[in-house]
Amino acid sequence: MKFVPRSAATRQRIIEATAELFNKKGLLGTSVSDLEKATGMTRGSIYGNFENKDAVALAAFEFNWERKQKLLLDGADSHNSYKDKLLAHVLLHHPSAKTPFTPGGCPLQNTVVEADDTNNLLRAKAATGLLSWTKNITGIIENGIKANEFKADTDSVGTALQIISIIEGASLYFRSTQDMKYVNKLLDTAKKIIDDICKT
């Protein structure tokens, strides 16, 4: 029988209250008592709106990723040139930008690292998010080629993969070393990739 939550509004409150918790502690590190504390609700109230803890984690990931994706898309959409749209994806990840992503780091990176060998549903959700981001950046590049802003022989998918890999790599280096020199060097590399596909 399909699970039906008691209240859509309560379900959303639970998601928002636990989004940061799951992003920081992960599914395995988050206990039911953590959920109760974060939401101010009883176990019965939580599980009246979610089938189990895994279901809360899935919804929290979706919330975190949609929030991050919206910030990136809005940032790109605020620019007219396709070069600046691409640069927005890079620059919004620099710590100095103070972009209000969910605390705890990139939800894609956090979720993939934890779920790779432990939870196929979470891994698949993260994969969907990553492929969506790749498609979005690929689209910007392809539109830039059509607008005669980028070189016609640009490998749009390959370039998108490079940019995302560098952004995620910069996040990994910053969180592990806390040394900005690696972040700056990596993001400068991403900017050079963008410069190199421009026609002028």
Image (cartoon, helix red, strand yellow):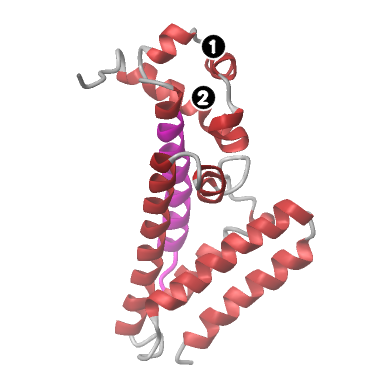
Mark 2, secondary structure of its residue: helix
Is there a contact, CB below 8 Å, between mark 1 and mark 2? yes
Q: Name the quarter where the N terminus is drawn.
A: top left
- Which image quadrant for residue 95? bottom right
* Percent position of residue 22, x then y: 55, 32
Which residue in the structure is indicated by mark 2? 17
Q: CA distance from mark 1 to mark 2?
A: 9 Å
Instruction: Return the x and y of residue 127 as percentages of the image width and height.
Output: 41, 53
* Residue 14 location, quadrant: top left
- 16 up-or-down from 180: above or below: above
Where is residue 54, by image quadrant?
Answer: top left
| Tag 2: amino acid | Ala
How far from the left and from the top, in percent, is residue 115? 50, 43
Q: Nearer the viewer, residue 74 or 135?
A: 135
Magenta range is 57-81
Residue for badge 1: 40
Label 1 vs 2, first from the N-terminus: 2
Label total for image: 2
Residue 74 versus residue 5: which sits nearer the camera?
A: 5
Q: Tell me: residue 157, above or below residue 61.
A: below
Which residue: 63% across, 41% down? 104
Q: Tell me if residue 5 is in the magenta stretch.
A: no
